[in-house]
Amino acid sequence: MERKVHIYADETLQRYVENAFSHDPSLHVYNDPSLTILPGFCDVHVHFREPGFSYKETIRTGSLAAAHGGYTAVCTMPNLNPVPDSLEHLQEEMKCIAKDAVIDVYPYGALTRGEKGEAMADLREMTPYVIAFSDDGHGVQSEEMMRSVMKKAASLHKIVAAHCEVNALLGGSCIHDGAYARAHGMKGISSASEYEEVRRNIRLAEETGCSLHICHVSTKESVQLVREAKRKGIDVTCETAPHYLIFTENDLQDEGRWKMNPPLRTEEDRKALIQGIQDGTIDCIATDHAPHSIEEKSRGLKGSAMGVAGLETAFPILYTYLVKKNIISLRRLMELMAYHPRSRFHIPMEGFAVFNLNETVQIHSEDFLSKGRATPFENMSVNGVCEAVYTKGKIVWQKKKY
Ligand code: DOR
């Protein structure tokens, strides 16, 4: 068959795509010169809420939303009920994944029991089944506890993915400690609450030899700390999320869809994050897809739950606002969204997404397959429509049914 669709990929994926097209005639409708094939994206930071909070999201709705966004692999954070802090608890999540996931879903195990930061989780027994360990949603406050879990994770050859947050420096707020907070008489979350724990965790990684991945970096100081650590040869990587690359506290409105943790920071922070994705300091873009019910997100900035849906907007937003504006290349975006997350977390390359990169659409959260509808990108015009996602021998999502 003459190849008309553009395959934007390395040789391995090229072969994978050729093979898929030759075995699956239902793919032939995508052999169209207006379409581009991209490697299946991999998000190392999502919240799928099951078990425990399936009114917010399930493995089914979350993984379908991921496929809709062009993802073929995600890693699910452990702030669940029960928290996967033992093999028995982890098995509850694994059962849901085995039954309902439409793409590869790799669970994290918790670092501490109940993510309370007080006693170590059963890291050893969970090791064969988890992608890495994290207490995401909470910083591990005790240095002694973090040192112990990092030593243990290092002995098990597992990465610690750290949510970095010093509770004592939070200031009891939900937005950045900056101009918006001052103008509206609100308390703010200091940048130090993030970067002081980034600093400590890098020091502990150096001391213990643990592989460290820093979650959702949002401040310029954190970027600089990671840059320096990499220069020193410390085994540290990090991620940021699309909203921190596009928005700042100046964009805040008193609506739940602007509320996430960490909060939107300043223009200086945003610029430092952009530099970080350009110069390789930041390894991955993860969405921190954190769906909540419509009611939980309807109580303004002060009363809403923290977190926004991200899987179905990440690629078109980043393609439109970073690639089309020549801030990074499409190649670099694929490193950040597909290749580096997989190489860092040893996730095999799998599947591909078919995109129409020229079509313009408006983002409407009512089109999401996720139960989470809160997005700061609502109504924005973007390029990049996902037409189909193929993985493990079949089409798992397609826009039009043929
Ligand atoms: O905004 C957030 N939402 N940040 C977190 O750290 C946790 C997450 C959630 O689970 O909702």
Image (spheres, rainbow, N blue to C red):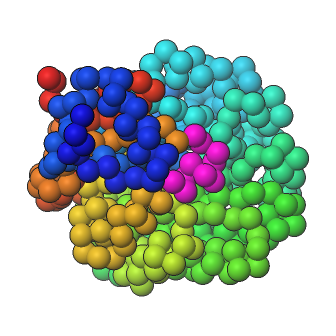
Tell me which corner region of the image, top left, top right, bottom left or bottom right, holds residue 141: bottom right
Q: Horizontal and vertical percent for residue 301?
A: 33, 58
Q: Residue furthest bottom?
A: 268
Residue 348 lies in quadrant: top right
Q: Can the viewer see residue 9?
A: yes
Relative image position of residue 321 (x, y in whole percent): 26, 68
For residue 244, side relative to residue 375 (left or right): right
Q: How many marks?
A: 0
Range shown magenta: 337-348
Question: In this orientation, which residue lies closer to the viewer: 350 or 1?
Answer: 1
In the rendered image, the residue lying farthest to the front is 2
Q: Is residue 194 left or right of residue 25?
A: right
- Magenta portion: prevailing SS class: helix
Measured along the vertical axis of the image, is residue 224 above or below residue 154?
below
Residue visible at 33% across and 28% down in the picture: 22
> Is 97 situated above or below 243?
above
Quadrant in the picture for the N terminus: top left
> What residue appears at the point 71 percent right and 76 percent down from the top-left corner?
229
Quadrant housing the C terminus: top left
The one nearer the camera, 175 or 137, is 137
Q: Is residue 326 left or right of residue 358?
A: right
Question: Observer-nearest residue: 263 or 220?
Answer: 220
- Image side of residue 123 versus residue 217, left or right: right
Q: Is residue 185 above or below residue 370?
A: below
In reply to whether residue 135 is colored magenta, the answer given is no
Q: Residue at position x 71%, y 80% from top?
A: 231
**What is the x, y in percent for residue 353?**
33, 41
Is residue 341 located in the magenta-colored stretch of the structure? yes
- Whether residue 374 can be seen here: no
